Amino acid sequence: MVLVLILAPLLLGFTRKVKARMLRRQGPPLLQPYRDLLRLSRKEVVLAENASWLFRSAPYMIFATTWVAAALVPTFATGLHFSWTADLIAITALLGSARLFLALVGMDVGTSFGGIGSSREMMFASLAEPAMIMIVFTVALVAGSTQLSYVANFMLTHASLRVSLGMALIALIIVALAENARIPVDNPATHLELTMVHEAMVLEYSGRHLAVIEMASALKLLLYISLIVCIFFPWGIAPLGAAPSAYLPGLATYLGKLMVGGFLLVLFETSIAKMRVFRVPEFLGTALMLGLLGTLLLFVSRSF
Amino acid sequence: MAVNSTLVCIAVLLATSMLAIIVHKARLGTRIIYVCVIAACLIILGVAVFRLLGSPGSAATVTLPIGLPWIGARFRVDALTAFFQIVINLGGTAASLYALGYGEHEEAPGRVLPFYPAFLAGMNLVLVADDAFSYLIAWEFMSLSSWALVVAHHRDGENTRAGYIYILMASFGTLALLLAFGLLAGPGGSYGFGEIRSAQRADWLPGLVLILVLIGTGSKAGLAPLHVWLPLAHPAAPSHVSALMSGVMTKVAVYGFIRIAFDLLGPPAWWWSIVVLALGSATAVLGVLFAILQRDLKRLLAYSTVENVGIIFIGLGLALAFKANGMTAASALAFTAALFHVLNHSFFKSLLFFGSGAVLTATGERDIEKLGGLIHPMPQTAFAFLGGCLAISALPPLNGFVSEWLLFQAILLSPDLPQWGLKLMVPAAGAMLALGAALSAACFVRCFGITFLGRPRSSEAAAARETDSFSRSGMFLLLAACLLAGLLPGLVIDAIAPVVQAHIGGRMPAQAAIAWLSIVPIAESRSSYNGLLVFLFIGLSTIFAVQIIHRFASNALRRGPAWDCGFPNSDPATQYTADSFAQPVRRVFSDVFQARETVDMPAPGDPRPARLDIKLRDLIWDAFYAPIGRWIAYAAEKLNHLQFLTIRRYLSLVFGALVALLLMVAIWP
């Protein structure tokens, strides 16, 4: 649990750095996100006049649900202590809770930008979440479990190329891009009014509240990369019941995989332009259809 | 014992109804009536809980010498009845508790008080009826008393129209049920459920009965395309009655479906489940899509009821599919999920209707475009309503998530079904279910965000006050129920198990023995979920985050004007509205809504305001009801001639009809 907390800003810093280098810029130092968080948490909070109790408590709720979800994804070892607490469907729903609170606080102060952000976020979510569930179905039908530890173990021992898994992987990447507000769905660096989605919702936050929310979104990015890695590329992860000595190489490969994941993300982001808002449903619809197709193939025959 | 005490309580409810006619004008009349209702509901509830947990396997019967002369009126309480008694009377207790406060604002108590206990009595009577005759009588009694409550505020033209459509659909549904029972009882007239259960039938008959039952109970539950009356009628009634109609009466319809399809009809055929699944998934998605567009708070909730009924029927369809193929464990899982959702929906939908009633009392508005900012004057109502929104959006750790999670687990078992039709249907139903869950989250973000957050959009909303303590306790009672069912789902599953055992022939593994109160539908290596631990983890991490932040970070806080990218505007009209919030969904699903947008943009220099007109059409209304209405009007026009015949022609018509009937009797074996 603590590991993801420490790593998340580093991953963010890494992606920013790589992105800047790709654009031939110097880029901020690797540890800049930590400094940003510290700086934010030291500043005073400026609260809008009509902000309610929900506005002040929601950042912590968003952070807590995202953190719990992130902690339930196996990173370098399967067989986490409480992995049976929640399965993949529950993790999806936990992220849904975080998003619901985020969308609500976007509307709390009663500004137009907050509303536009919430509205668009919920539209994206209403397609991304079913897509995610269909991906879960595909994976679960292949692995015979929705429990992530078991899925990772299955993939580790029965690795094979399957059409349905390929579809699920593409769909999951699309969903991950949308959920983390990355290009082409949203731009994490933008503050241009009409293009904001995620940033529009947190517009009124400042100080420690903003720090907590930034931390939560960093965690979410880490969570999705870990999820993709753990389901589709579990090589090197310490298997169920392994000795603690196996954890070290597991950790090393995990860090390596995170770097590769972050690098690919940046590569994709720099090579593509942002979409118009109403193109996004088509983009996410692709994910939903791929997920559904993968599930249908598995219903037709288990060998796909 | 159980049946007798239930019948006595129903008689008490009916007597309360009579009493209400006398005391409704008295100062304490409202209080007296609702307290009597609470007492009666609590007794039935207690007996039912005792029965379900104590002696679940057995059934008790009583026969009274009323009703049809050759069988009398039979009443019976078994596990299924006991489960639904719990659902109904818990809802009834909460609604009456809420009404202790809410009912004080009623302008015409004489139109509500006498029918309210009668409505509850009718619903309870449906559950205990054990022959077709008393079942139908009770069913009609329930329909008519709820109709009287729908038209309680009859001066509003909308309400009378709602009442008219409701009574039409209700009679149509009862007609279908009447035919279904006629087919079941056969020519011998053996209307007792016991005889029906053991009767031998022709092969084609159960299928036909199932279709009739789907029409009959589906029209009451709000299954598409028979749902059109529901979003009109449910909001028209006073809010605690809306809560009962949406949260509870739809469940009586579900009970009717289960009683006939799972109990009386015998072993199912696999194609039944295709019909049920198709209707269920269409209902779920249509319901929530229309809910997103509504501006009327109570109508929004009513459409969301349609969605949840769809979810329940998806569960029942899956259970039928598995049962027809002899997959008992999977069938038990799907059936449990459906029943769990019945319980959950009765909790959170009643809670949300109570909240909308509190908003209505505080502001006099149901149009969410005129509300906003209510979280400041009504923090407790807002908190309870938020809990209801989270629960209905299927988010952990509340209860709505558990039943949907169980449903997803059941869907994951379905590749083993042998029929190709089902193999293709079930994943589609799963996708619809997921889409419905995600859209309902969007719908309730909009509902809560526009109503309670932001700034007040009208002077009424600005002057709102927190609602009374009885109303709040009604809401918090249900909120606690939502939380408990979400945290300890294993206990609920075990309590439902006798019902599942009786109608599926198997049950889910006992959950009480599993460590840490997790739920494990099939095997731990397959899936498990622990609401309690998720709740604890979230709670601990929240506390941890708050502690860390408040210890090490700055505690300074300053209030200032909203930033809004540097252009704050104090006019509440600059806020995002409910319609604009729904606009992306309307655009994405424009094919379903047949939305037509026309923009009237004046030329530069023209001081006329710009206008955006949106026309929405209900596809189902256009496709089914409008043609039927036209056809009936046409037939009525033609038949009108028959009114002006001579006496000779009338006599010859009568003679002709007689001959035709006699011929039919002669030819029919």
Image (cartoon, coloured by chain):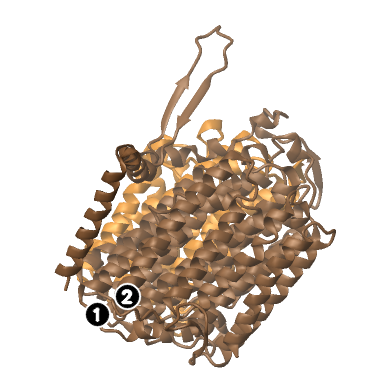
Say which residue label 2 marks: B184
Amino acid residing under circle 1:
Arg
Instruction: Residue lying at the far front in this picture: please name it.
Output: B648
Q: Name the residue located 61 percent from the left edge and 68 percent from the top edge.
A: B120
Q: Is residue B440 left or right of residue A216?
A: left
Q: Is disc 2 surrounded by few (<14), some (14 to 19) or many (20+) residues within 10 Å?
A: many
Distance of mark 1 from mark 2, alpha carbons? 8 Å
Q: Chain of mark 1?
A: B
Q: Are marks 1 and 2 on the same chain?
A: yes
- Between A196 and A131, which is closer to the camera in this rendering? A131
Q: Name the residue located 44 percent from the left edge and 74 percent from the top edge.
A: B133
Quarter of the figure with the C terminus of chain B: bottom left
The secondary element bearing badge 1 is classed as: loop
Q: Is disc 1 surrounded by few (<14), some (14 to 19) or many (20+) residues within 10 Å?
A: some
Q: Chain of mark 2?
A: B
Instruction: Residue lying at the far left in this picture: please name it.
Output: B667
Asked whether disc 1 touches disc 2, contact meaning CB atoms under 8 Å apart, the reply is yes
Q: Name the residue located 32 percent from the left edge and 58 percent from the top edge.
A: A169
- Between A70 and B221, which is closer to the camera in this rendering? B221
Chain B colour in the picture = brown
Residue B550: percent from left, percent from top: 77, 59
Whether residue A228 appears in this view of the structure is no
Q: Earlier in the sequence, mark 1 or mark 2?
A: 2
Chain A colour in the picture = orange
The secondary element bearing badge 2 is classed as: helix
- Between B655 and B93, which is closer to the camera in this rendering? B655
Find residue B201 and name its label: 1
Q: Name the residue located 50 percent from the left edge and 46 percent from the top edge.
A: B292
Q: Is residue B128 above or below residue B474?
A: below
Residue A75: percent from left, percent from top: 46, 69
Residue A188: percent from left, percent from top: 51, 42
